[in-house]
Image: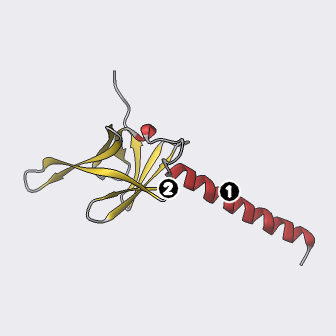
Amino acid sequence: MKRQDMKNRQLYRLAACLVGAATLLLQSCSGNRNCDRLCGSWSSVEGKPDVLIYKEGDAYKVTVFSRSGRTRKLKPETYLLVEEDGNLFINTGYRIDVAYNEAADILTFSPNGDYVRKEVKP
């Protein structure tokens, strides 16, 4: 194996580790970081229900605005945003992981896809 190939392989491994570390930082609200930047109204890029994230006391909550039944009446449901081992999630009866890409200002709910911040109109 050539010496240059070994150096390239090491650089690729280092790059993969750095990308993984950056992803973990974006997903967490621990330490000096807080979840205030998540607060606001979010709209799905895939047509899923809108969500609102807000702070109530020391807790962060996620309200999902979905329509149900024949009348398609708006039925908001609120869940606690939980952090465990540096990962965010909500428990709706099953775990939905939440990740935030600060650079792109995109919120991702797994498995519901990406959400973009709604613009605030004056």
Quadrant occupied by the C terminus: top left
- Identify residue for label 1: 18
How far from the left and from the top, in percent, is residue 33? Answer: 52, 42
Label 1 close to label 2 by CB (< 8 Å): no
Q: What residue lies at 31% left-to-right and 47% top-to-bottom? A: 62
Quarter-wise, where is residue 117 in the image?
top left
Q: What residue lies at 31% left-to-right and 45% top-to-bottom? A: 61
Going by the numbered disc 1, the residue's amino acid type is Leu
Up the image or down, 77 lies above or below 15; here it is: above
Q: Is residue 106 left or right of residue 3?
A: left
Q: What residue lies at 56% left-to-right and 42% top-to-bottom? A: 103
Nearest the eye: 106 or 95:
95
- Identify residue for label 2: 86
Going by the numbered disc 2, the residue's amino acid type is Gly
- Label 1 vs 2, first from the N-terminus: 1
Quarter-wise, where is residue 59 in the image?
top left
Nearest the eye: 39 or 33:
33
